[in-house]
Image: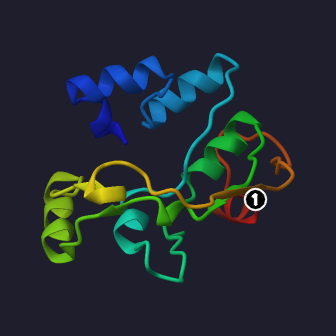
Amino acid sequence: ASIIHVVPLMRDITQWGGVCDVAKKSVYNLLGMGRSIQLVIGGQTEMFESRSWDEEIVVVRKKRLGVFKIAIQHGVGILPMFCFGETQTMDNVYLPKIQAYVKSKLGFPIPYIPYGRWFLPVPRRVPVTVVMDAPVFPKRKMDDPPLEDIIDM
């Protein structure tokens, strides 16, 4: 999230690891330089809907078409991936009303206090299975793809 690149120590650590801002401008610049990018779909919404003790996996797809539009505009493929067990590694303090209110006002939820083993920010030792499918490529590159083509991809 963009907020990570504002907090001094977090910014330094993530940028040292090659993590870039997810703003549209940053993604366009990286693709324009011929770089491959990895976007982790999901985020705050899924984080606050998922619990380690739940059997269900929450994936929010509403209004998440931007990555497909960018792929069509640049003529690049998308490699579908999913991590099973990831939600069991960490939890977050669960104060949904307060977090939803603050997120609506500031754009990010507070309090955000992740915890895992021993109620510390240390992931739990659980099996995590990553699955991948074949890449999905756009039918053709377009500067302004219609909504139908974006949904079709």
Q: Residue at x 53, y 71 (%)?
A: 59
Furthest residue in direction bottom, as rendered: 55
User: In front: 89, or 44?
Assistant: 89
Mark 1 crowd level (few <14, some 14–19, many ≥20, 10 Å Cα)? some
The picture places residue 63, in percent across and down from the top left corner, at: 49, 65
- Kindly state the secondary structure of the residue where label 1 is placed: loop
The picture places residue 23, in percent across and down from the top left corner, at: 42, 36
Q: Residue at x 65, y 51 (%)?
A: 68
User: How is the rendered protein coloured?
Assistant: rainbow
Q: What is the quadrant of residue 44 in the picture?
A: bottom left
Image check: 7 left or right of 117?
A: left
The picture places residue 135, in percent across and down from the top left corner, at: 83, 48
Q: Amino acid at mark 1?
A: Met
Quadrant of the image containing the C terminus: bottom right
Quadrant of the image containing the N terminus: top left
Residue behind mark 1: 153
Q: Residue at x 62, y 42 (%)?
A: 70
Visible residue check, residue 116: no
User: In front: 133, or 138?
Assistant: 133
